[in-house]
């Protein structure tokens, strides 16, 4: 898809006329008096939380922002594979993929050995390792991601629409305040950010501060970002340009000898490019004061860094000096000894990163992806509030690890390249190796949550070596039984808040008397202690809380629908319609027909014994169990769900 | 994607609340006094034509329908692979794919040999042969396809919105009528189909009658549908049901012994199913008069046909008795000896088919896909009106062939299955073979337009054996050079009305002195008779009329951007920005990385010599030429474009 050829214009590029891309801001309505969840901030963290909560019609949510309207341009643009997996769960991955630039390779440039004042390519590497994820690594304006979340919010049962022009002034928590322990005060801003002195008060069960690096919620609960004292300053600009630099449509990391470093990120639509220039590394005499910084200064710097190549910038769509440290708060909620959390922090409000690894947006959405369903489970009575403490525990550890990684990456990125004159510099080959090594990290798929009430010990990990307990469920291709459709098994984990039990059958005839999946289904259907019976409200669909799916090793045509266990064809909805989409088979098609990938082999699943894989609503593997470990199943769900 | 679980509701299923799926009908505006193209009918044929013309901002188009609003439910539902290829050109294939049911296999059922009153499965076959198309065969409500066209129309530069509640009363053609030879009269219908007696008159350069099987435009120009006198009557219903029929989520063709035949088409959303019941084949005593036909009668028939299985229908979303013959008009326009065409017919207005092969919608959109860009070329001055006569010639031949095919298919479908008692019946195995054989036909990829000013003689077909002159360009995977993105080459043929020249390089170093692509680019850039120079208006982008793309056999990393010919990096738009997306390479990735498919091998392209493939704006291969056959290039374009 090509667009922005005649200049950058925000909004949906499918509209030819930029005027038609303008979406009117929502009608101003008073804030509700009391809500279940009050979200402060319409950045990616806040919008993702609202999108997740909008899937539950019974939860009352308000989301506010001090801005006048949705974001239109600028800020982050990298979409990691893992984030795309989440977009898939919401149903908008295809649309993002269609619009976005896809990062297939990255190019590395260093000073030319012969002419050190000029740069030369040191190499190109594949950006996303094979089978790291079924999803690509993409680049697109953060604003378009916001647009997708806004659609999901509006379209979901909760029908959530932001309240703009509301600035949080402060909040108070009264742990004994009954149903709504948090009271927040907002001031209305009118006519483009003038303070109206009109104050609104809202009471909330839970507050989530998604209000960015200068979070007022953070201040209100007495938390502080701690870490590097020194901020790194980057000049960043989205431009339309012509150039003789050969890798302009590849992500390019450029180390110059004396002129500093830069990063080129090709952007959506075929013409736009983002340039990141590390300002601290500009030559002393080239540095300019912050208030004298301008696009011209940045373009001049780019031209010096890129010698012998030049850029001819035709339009600056957006630019900024993005100055940020690597900091994190001590915890992501306001809980204390003996006092449960009422206020949570997410995204930049509790951890900030240098933009080089492109983690700001991706980590922020992953925070609320972790929190959203937990809040939903508590608010709908599916789980007790005890599960909420896993949010801070799980995400804080990852936030810290990311900062450690980012620090090392930044050090290498900012260091001078190794040369005769700079023997202590970074070897470009080493940098490139590091870059590849940490591909998993930046793709967001390396996160492994520690054992907790939510994550098992993984004592039976050898039954599914590639579906690591604590890591995200790594999807693989299968054939759906009912309609022979080739698909990714992971794509049945939609953002509906349900746990999944994947029953991978052993090497026996499906649904025969020795079939472990059959025994499991019998247990789930009939046993008094079956989690299905224990945790599914009578009025809910059988798969609303725990969604059982089976995978068989036979050819899909060799299993007859009539033989399938009723648990695998649950009656749903007002008519009790059969859901036929619970059963999958190994893809036995030849490679020439697009097949040839066996999920058991790809994910190290024990072909003899099979296994159970429990997956959390956020797609993380909660536990791997033997197919007949009913006690293990019961034990797991007892910790995370409340009996109905 | 699952939806319709709690009942069918029209509109975009991404909205949880059916009320929010309601799109208000467009504001009523008076018809314009004069237009370039007046389209009568908002069925698939008309909407596709409007969608194509909306890509040209300068063409004035009006599209009218007597209905009150867009279609919401019913009519056709099969989307052939070829139709999906066209959707891809418009940019909405992904969205349709996400929503639709995908036909991967078909099941065949016949009378059980032992218990002839019961049916038994005779087999299952893969529905779409490997590498028939990169697109799947899908099933989705025709109304959703309309919605996509309506989006494209609204979003394109032409910003076309239908005028509903306008009934064509008649039209007159005055060949000497100057600029606007056709005069049409419409009556406004208000308050749901009451005649207002308010008449509007519109003048048009061209009129396209897309007004369905009872076309008034057809009558006005004195054409008649001719063919089978006998209409076939089918009961068709979209239902939500439970059943013990094992193949309910597969397309299933059922021949019963004495109860008639039916066709099961699983539908989008996971729960809905379409049942087609051939009414003429019901047992004599079971037949009911048309006016006594009801969903109950159809369900009862289904239950008799499917014995020993039963269906328990919970909701009827839509039903109809669809009665149609196999007919076609003698020509698809009003041209006569010495008089050019002013009025065209498309879709059901000029040919009708039994629904079994699912060709109604697919052929209708392919009609206007053929016509739209030709009209646009004439109206924008790119081509003379002479090209318009190829529309009727190309599409009439195909329409006739389809009827012949359909007649044979219907005969086999309706015939009794062969058995001891019915030795003259159809052998189920033979039917199955026929079904597979004609997969190409029903997929829409078998169409081969005859040589004409638009389609070359194919004298050099052996240079690209798999890119048949006259057939649609059969896409294959490549790697885009600038960003190493794996993609389908055919997907750069978007619906923008441009011809493509694909230059497939021979086995020499890219852009070296013996490189035929380099020589071709030099010629295209510099030679006075270069079609690029001759037919591209000064103010247009260099690729607006003829879009040149090159494919090389080297690894994409071994070709440096700097070496590429300027013709392959044309300056575009108001800034003269470089377009980097014109160069492709063979996908050399190993199979394990998703590669392993060589476009030269897949499409029989001569690796030594390479070749030129000219592709029409509607994706049909116009000609295959040797790389150095500049005269051939000139000759082709002389026939179809007008020098600027
Ligand atoms: C100017 C800018 C440039 C950036 N550039 C890059 C970049 O180049 N690359 C990169 O990777 N990342 C960049 N980022 C970071 C990236 O956008 C963030 O990491 C990401 O947006 C974090 O998401 P978030 O939801 O946590 O917070 P944010 O996106 O910061 O959203 C916070 C929201 O809260 C609102 N808010 C704040 N205080 C209040 C209040 N008191 N009352 C009401 N609302 C309030 C804000 O208006 C804002 O909309 C940039 C961020 C900014 C602000
Ligand atoms: C009730 C019905 C059921 C069908 N069922 C099936 C099926 O089950 N399977 C299948 O494959 N195909 C079915 N079809 C056929 C399929 O829908 C058509 O082949 C396809 O829609 C043809 O597209 P079209 O654009 O040529 O015409 P249509 O879709 O018929 O569109 C013609 C349009 O022109 C309008 N129109 C007609 N006369 C005038 C006038 N004088 N003034 C203004 N507007 C006018 C009509 O209102 C209509 O919207 C069905 C069609 C109908 C009508």
Image (cartoon, coloured by chain):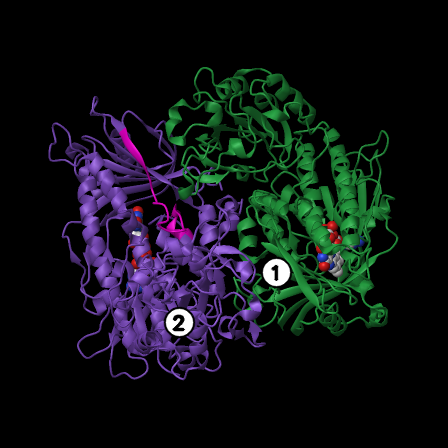
Chain colours: A purple, B green
Picture disc at residue B250 = 1
User: From where the camera sits, is residue B294 visible?
Assistant: yes
Q: Position of residue A430 (x, y in %)?
A: 20, 38
> Is mark 2 in CB contact (under 8 Å) with mark 1?
no
Which residue is at a point 41% across and 33% down the rendered structure image?
Answer: B482
Read off the magenta span: A121-144
The chain carrying label 1 is B
Q: Position of residue B166 (x, y in %)?
A: 75, 55
Does the magenta segment cover residue A180?
A: no
Q: Nearer the viewer, residue A368 or B295?
A: B295
Please state if A642 lies on the left or on the right of B122 as rendered: left
Above or below: residue A524 compared with residue B135: below
Q: Quadrant of the C terminus of chain A?
A: bottom left
Q: Nearer the viewer, residue B505 or A284?
A: B505
Q: Quadrant of residue A320?
A: top left
Q: CA distance from mark 2 to mark 1?
A: 41 Å
The chain carrying label 2 is A
Q: Within 10 angstroms of label 1, few (less than 14), some, or many (20 or more) residues?
A: many
User: From where the camera sits, is residue A165 visible?
Assistant: no
Q: Quadrant of ligand 1?
A: bottom left
Q: Quadrant of residue A381?
A: bottom left
Q: Position of residue A425 (x, y in %)?
A: 14, 35
Q: Nearer the viewer, residue A438 or A375?
A: A438
Question: Can you tell me whether the CB of the residue at mark 2 lies under 8 Å from the nearest atom of ligand 1?
Answer: no
Please state if A150 lies on the left or on the right of B493 as rendered: left
Front label number (2 vs 1)? 1
Residue tagged 2? A61
Picture disc at residue A384 = none
Does the magenta segment cover residue A126?
A: yes
Which residue is at a point 21% across and 21% down the rendered structure image?
Answer: A114
């Amino acid at each position: 898809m090509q667009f922005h050829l005649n200049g950058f214009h925000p909004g949906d590029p499918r509209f030819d006329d930029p005027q038609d891309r303008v979406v009117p801001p929502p009608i101003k309505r008073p804030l509700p008096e009391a809500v279940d969840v009050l979200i402060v901030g319409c950045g990616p963290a806040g919008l993702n939380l609202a999108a997740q909560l909008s899937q539950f019609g019974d939860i009352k949510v308000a989301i506010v922002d001090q801005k006048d309207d949705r974001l239109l341009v600028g800020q982050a643009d990298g979409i990691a594979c893992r984030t795309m997996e989440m977009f898939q769960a919401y149903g908008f991955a295809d649309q993002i993929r269609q619009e976005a630039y896809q990062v297939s390779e990255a190019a590395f440039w260093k000073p030319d050995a012969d002419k050190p004042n000029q740069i030369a390519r040191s190499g190109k590497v594949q950006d996303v390792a094979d089978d790291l994820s079924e999803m690509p690594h993409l680049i697109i304006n953060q604003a378009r991601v916001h647009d997708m979340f806004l659609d999901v919010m509006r379209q979901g049962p909760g029908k959530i629409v932001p309240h703009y022009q509301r600035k949080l002034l402060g909040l108070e928590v009264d742990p004994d305040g009954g149903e709504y322990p948090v009271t927040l005060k907002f001031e209305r801003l009118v006519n483009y950010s003038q303070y109206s002195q009109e104050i609104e008060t809202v009471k909330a069960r839970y507050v989530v501060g998604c209000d960015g690096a200068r979070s007022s919620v953070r201040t209100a609960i007495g938390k502080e970002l701690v870490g590097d004292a020194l901020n790194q300053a980057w000049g960043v600009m989205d431009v339309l340009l012509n150039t003789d630099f050969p890798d302009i449509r590849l992500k390019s990391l450029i180390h110059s000898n004396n002129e500093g470093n830069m990063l080129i990120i090709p952007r959506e639509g075929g013409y736009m490019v983002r340039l990141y220039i590390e300002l601290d590394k500009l030559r002393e005499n080239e540095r300019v004061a912050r208030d004298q910084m301008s696009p011209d200064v940045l373009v001049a710097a780019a031209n010096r860094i890129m010698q012998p190549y030049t850029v001819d910038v035709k339009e600056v769509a957006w630019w900024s000096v993005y100055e940020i440290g690597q900091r994190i708060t001590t915890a992501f909620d306001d809980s204390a000894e003996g006092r449960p959390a009422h206020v949570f922090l997410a995204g930049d409000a509790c951890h900030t990163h240098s933009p080089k690894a492109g983690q700001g947006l991706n980590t922020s959405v992953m925070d609320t992806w972790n929190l959203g369903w937990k809040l939903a489970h508590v608010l709908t009575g599916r789980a007790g509030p005890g599960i909420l403490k896993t949010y801070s525990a799980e995400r804080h550890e990852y936030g810290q690890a990311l900062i450690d990684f980012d620090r090392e990456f930044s050090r290498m990125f900012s260091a001078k390249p190794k040369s005769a004159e700079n023997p202590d510099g970074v070897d470009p080959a080493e940098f490139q190796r590091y870059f590849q090594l940490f591909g998993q990290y930046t793709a967001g798929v390396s996160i492994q949550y520690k054992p907790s009430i939510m994550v098992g010990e993984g004592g039976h990990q050898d039954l599914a070596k590639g579906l690591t307990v604590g890591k995200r469920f790594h999807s693989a291709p299968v054939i759906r039984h009912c309609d022979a459709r080739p698909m990714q098994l992971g794509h049945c984990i939609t953002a509906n808040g349900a746990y999944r039990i994947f029953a991978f059958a052993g090497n026996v005839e499906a649904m025969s008397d020795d079939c472990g999946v059959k025994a499991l289904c019998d247990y789930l259907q009939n046993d008094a202690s079956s989690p299905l019976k224990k945790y599914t409200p009578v009025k809910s669909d059988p798969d609303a809380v725990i969604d059982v799916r089976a995978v068989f090793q036979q050819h899909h045509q060799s299993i007859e629908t009539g033989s399938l266990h009723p648990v695998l064809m649950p009656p749903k909805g007002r008519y009790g319609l059969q859901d036929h989409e619970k059963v999958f088979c190994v893809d036995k098609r030849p490679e020439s027909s697009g097949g040839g990938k066996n999920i058991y082999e790809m994910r190290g699943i024990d072909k003899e014994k099979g296994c159970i894989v429990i997956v959390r609503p956020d797609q993380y593997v909660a536990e791997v169990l033997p197919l007949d470990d009913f006690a293990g199943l019961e034990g797991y769900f007892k910790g995370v769900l409340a009996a109905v």
